[in-house]
Structure formats: C-alpha cells, structure tokens
Amino acid sequence: MHVLAITRLFPNAAAPLTAPYNRLQLGALSEFCDVSVMATLPWFPGARLAARWSAAGRFDGVPYREQVDGMPVVHPRALYVPKVSGWVSPALYAASLGPELFKRRKDISVVLGAWAYPDGCAAVGVAQLLGVPAVVKVHGSDLNVLAYEPGPGKVLRRMLPRADRVMVVSRALGQVARDLGVADERVAVVYNGVDSSRFFPADRAEARAELGLSADGKLFVYVGNVLETKGIYDLLEAFRGVSGARLVIVGGGPAKERCDEAGDQVIAVGPRPHEEVPRWIAASDVLVLPSWAEGTPNVVLEALSCGRRVVATDVGGIPDLIDRELLGELVPAKSPETLRGALQRAVERDYDPLEIARVGGRGDWADSGRALHSLLEEVVAEHGARR
C-alpha cells in the first residue's frame, strides 16, 4: 500500500516546528507502508516581496524536495488569492498538485488529506480523478470553526461526505462531521499519540534548574499558538488574580506582545523546538489550556504522560482526556473569572505525578500509526471490492 498524504500542515526548511503531530503520525505510519507527502505552500505572484507580512513570502526559499524523518516530501506551490480563495481554495489546491500527481498516478493506493479545508476537500477530488479512495483527517478548528464560514462551510458540506472515511481525533469532532452530512459508518476515531521516550514523569526541580527557573512556588505552563482564540487574553486576565504562582507561555503568535507586558508573574519564552517542550512541562505543576475550540490537543496528552495535572476549557475532545477530578479541572470557555478559581484551586493542590501518568496516559505514536494503517487498509480493501 502506498499512501499519498497531502497537507499544508507539515514541517519545512523555513518552518521546522510546524505541526509536529502530522510529522510524528505519518512517520509512525511509514513503518507499516510506503508514505509520501505533498506539503503544499501558499504562493502568489510577487510573494517574495511580501515576506514581512505573508507566509507565502517567507516560504519562497523552501526547496521543492525535502526528506523529513525518512519520508520523501515535495512542496507544490498552491495559488492563494486573498479574499477570494475562501471559495475556490480546494480547486486551486488540487490544481497545484497536478504535475506531481501525473507522475505518480499509477503508484497511489489511497489519498490521505490532513486538515479538512482545503486539504481534505482537495484530497477527495484528487482521489476521485485517480480512481482511489480518500480519507480525510480532521483536527478541530477545521470543522469547529471553518465549517461555519460561508465559503468553506458550503464546500465542506459538499465534499466531506464523499470521503471514504473521515478520521477524527475525538468523539465530539465525529459528531460535528455527522452534522455536516458524513454517514455514521464513514466516521472513524483515531487518536493521536505521544512520544513516550520524551514525555514521561521527570524530576520537576531538575527541569527548572535546566531551564533557569526558580525552584520555589507553583508553576503553570501554556504551550501552543499565542492567539486570542486559544484563550490567551482570558488566561492573562484570570492569572492577575492568582496568588502563589507563575505562568510560563511557550509559543509564538499575535498575542505574544500582550504576554510580554503582563508583569513579572508571566514569562513568555516564545516558540521552542518540540524536543524542548517536555522540559517545560516537566518544570510545571499544571498545564493550562483555555482554548475556545479544540479537537484532541496533543499538549494535553503530553502533559498527562508527563504526570502533570491540567486546567483546560470544556471544549472539543478535552473532556475525553480529563475525565476525572484526579487529572485536572475543566471550565467553560471565555470565562476568565471561572478560570481564575480553577487556577487558584490548582495552586493549593498537591498530587502524585506517577499516578497522573498511570491513569491519564494514552498510547504512543506507534499505536496511532498502527491504528491509522489498519483504517487505510480497510478502506483500500472496501474500494477494491466495489470495483
């Protein structure tokens, strides 16, 4: 079986930290079958001149071909037309793959689109042209947010039900897919994994010393994109009323400037390599994730595997993970006052990290890759039986 994965969310030479979950899951899948990746990059005429404000310009120097974790990766340039692409992105995206698809058309067993729009929609169209099955992996905001925008929503309702499977990372996201018209039997849950060689209970004091953090007091850590929709402003407002603790924010984004101005209790360290994230989690007492919408966030899986409690919003697949008081506390999204109370209670609570890891830990990436491989084999067999 040869799997062609197409996605915009994949590391490249200019953005090596992008979507480590896709790299790790596809890398695990490649242990069971042949995997090649078409990781598209946005492009428009003159993009290089717009590098200061556009990702298309920053990606201009990325080589067309790369090797990532032993997988062959190509980077077709997909035409992006601001304010127009919302309606036509899947068609432009699919067209950008044409030259590579023509060369590989006889070797592809199944097309896997990772991210619903435009990637997944384009994957369905490409698979139909090639006469092979399509599987679309959805992550969270690609359905929870984009499906309710006029252009993307209309396309998703038309294309997503045509996929042979829609692979979701939580039960809640599966229901969203059904609400968009995907037949129940075409929805499959495959959870992401955790790199158990990096995410495990480690000594807190040792991690703090390594990172130059004080050994005293309780420490909260946020890891992710620093965006309003990730609840960053809610978190900063809530944290102003919490005593006896500090907050470290690991990640970059438009809201980081506000974090830098939040006072001595808040340390914004910017984006860090994924390999460093386990040390920041190990240094913490509690992971906090106040997002407005989520799928099944990998950082929660990683925190639990590290034996750290979690304070998070009650959205998406998070309740599947924080399913008992031992593991943490859930609060409503967009409620800084409620979040403040949960954070203060977390400051005052002690726990056994080994017990958190034992109860809350999930499978590793090998398990996730194995489950994905079984799903793809099932889809390929079904497609062959119908021909």
Image (cartoon, rainbow, N blue to C red):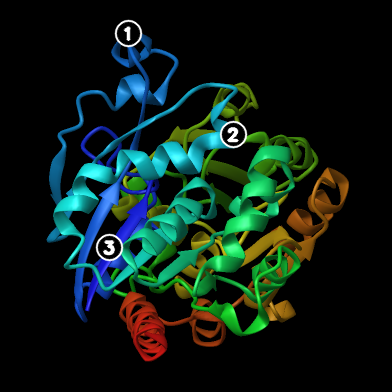
Cα distance, mark 1 to mark 3? Answer: 32 Å
Q: Residue 9, how many percent across, how many down?
A: 39, 48
- Given residues 2 and 28, the one toward you in this image is 2
> Which residue carries the number 2 mark?
86
The secondary structure type at the circle numbered 1 is helix
Local crowd size for mark 2, using a 10 Å CA cut-off: few (<14), some (14–19), many (≥20): some
- Given residues 176 and 69, the one toward you in this image is 176
Q: Residue 275, how many percent across, how many down?
A: 29, 54
Contact, CB < 8 Å: mark 1 with mark 2? no
Q: Residue at x 37, y 80 (%)?
A: 376
Q: Residue at x 67, y 57 (%)?
A: 157
What residue occupies the far front of the structure in this picture?
387
The quadrant of the rendering that contains the N terminus is bottom left
Q: Vertically, is 33 above or below 150?
A: below
Local crowd size for mark 3, using a 10 Å CA cut-off: few (<14), some (14–19), many (≥20): many
Report the amino acid beneath label 1: Leu
Cα distance, mark 2 to mark 3? Answer: 24 Å
Contact, CB < 8 Å: mark 2 with mark 3? no
Report the amino acid beneath label 2: Gly
> Which residue carries the number 3 mark?
4
Tell me the tag on residue 49: 1
Q: Residue 165, how many percent across, how many down?
A: 51, 75
Q: Is residue 213 visible?
A: yes
The secondary structure type at the circle numbered 3 is strand
Where residue 33 sits, quadrant-wise, is: bottom left
The secondary structure type at the circle numbered 2 is helix
The answer to which of marks 2 and 3 sits earlier in the sequence is 3
Q: With 46 as the anchor, is 61 left or right in this view?
A: left
Report the amino acid beneath label 3: Leu
Q: Vertically, is 42 above or below 220?
A: above
Where residue 360 sits, quadrant-wise, is: bottom right
The quadrant of the rendering that contains the C terminus is bottom left
